[in-house]
Amino acid sequence: MIKALSTAPVLAATALALSLLPGSGLAMTAGAGRADIVLPSDLLPFQNFSTQADPLKVRALILGQGDQKAAIVVLDMTSLFTDEINEVRAIAGELAGIAPDHTLVIASHTFSAPHLFPPRPANATAMPGGPPPEDPAKATALHDAVNAAVRKALSQAIGSIRPASLAFGTGVSNVNVNRNVKTAQGWWLGANEAGPSDKVLQVLKLDDETHRTIAVLTNYAVQSSIMDQTGGQDGKKVITADLGGGAMNFAESRLGDSAVAMFLTGAAGDQVPAYTAHQHGLDAAGLDQIDDIGPAGLVLVKLQGNRLGQAVVTATATASPASADRLVIANAAVRLATQDRPKQLSQLHPSTTYQSGQVADAPYTVLVVGDLAIVGVQVELSASTGAWIRSHSPFAHTMVVTMVNGAAKYLPDAGGYSDITYEAMNSSYAPGGAEKLAGAVLETLKALKPGHP
């Protein structure tokens, strides 16, 4: 069952799809911008972070066609809560007049960034799964720094809006690997090179009339977790945009100063970088064993970031012209059965059981740009589910993006639940949810595709 979160936007999107058929003659416009999140000099230590290796960034793209406008804003954050998403949307509305539900707010999913937790009293208890409350002044300073970067990136995007043409390209990259490994106690974390992995990389390039690149959207199934839980001083963590940020920095350095490269994390719930600083392996008894190379792991960010960035550049160079005749957005949700999961990550361990829960909605958004459908979900899907949606989509090109307009933890496929993987144990949804969500998304894609039965 597809349940519309807001009936009006879905109906409006369907009507728009019918009115902007191929040959409508309406030109696509685009503008892009980026800005560093300038952290206060006295922020660290904060949330167990002690040092910063490279800037976290905000990147923004504004698309327009006739009276229709949409925005994509990517923040180098692990995940985003509703209050921050609403603030980003409010800024987009203030500066560009974009409706809140026409702005996609996406976390790049770097694991090495402090969380923007919702405001809490100084004497509050810890949030489930989160660190204890810290200095409210530092939390406010982080919040202000992020929103200042959002405002700057969107302002640049507005100032650079111009007619745009589209091109779509694909490539292959081997910087990801399946992370589910069978141990003597059950399935756990590691690097499973024989496990399912989606190596397909997709790019959407937007060029202006002088053939200068405005922006490149990159979709690839990998978590930016090379420096997760490590890399700082005194055993603490380092702040870094990690793999996705490094790849986009590399791509921008090759594509020209005007280009803004945006990393849209794919269905990466079970996909990690091939080489990480905090490494899970197995000892002789088949039990989990961790090796941690600490700050030395930053070279892995550089090497793998450059490698993924080069794949982006190559795919961009060979991209083929794509349709730019439609701009449509629809918001919906599917109701799924839930399960209970541990309140703290530290409570997770290889296991063979899980607990049933009630029901909850899993929201998703579909942004249609020409003959490209960008499917944005809050949940972290497994690579196999993302590949299934892509292969069954009626659109010529389909990107499946996670961490869109919020975060809802993992939604693994049937195999993940059968094995009781880390993702299955750390999911709020019960078995069968991924397949039901994928089916609902496919029905929405069919509804938004002109001429599809």
Image (tube, rainbow, N blue to C red):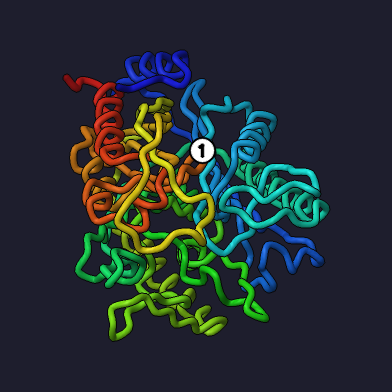
Q: Nearer the viewer, residue 337 or 237?
A: 337
Residue 449 percent coordinates (x, y): 26, 25
Report the residue at 37% width, 23% height from top.
Answer: 25
Q: Is residue 239 above or below residue 370?
A: below
Badge 1 amino acid: Asn
Q: Is residue 198 above or below residue 403?
A: below
- Looking at the rendered structure, the secondary structure element under dot 1 is loop
| Quadrant where the C terminus is found in the figure | top left
Q: Nearer the viewer, residue 241 or 66?
A: 241
Q: Is residue 300 above or below residue 402?
A: below
Residue 294 percent coordinates (x, y): 54, 81
Report the residue at 43% width, 72% height from top.
Answer: 306
Residue at the disc numbered 1: 405
| Quadrant where the N terminus is found in the figure | top left
- Taking the image as drawn, is residue 312 in sight? yes
Horizontal side of residue 156 vs 193, given as left or right:
right
Horizontal side of residue 447 vs 96, given as left or right:
left
Residue 96 percent coordinates (x, y): 63, 31
Q: Nearer the viewer, residue 292 or 72?
A: 292
- Taking the image as drawn, is residue 364 in sight? no
Report the residue at 58% width, 77% height from top.
Answer: 231
Report the residue at 52% width, 50% height from top.
Answer: 343
Q: Is residue 275 above or below residue 31?
A: below
Q: How many marks?
A: 1
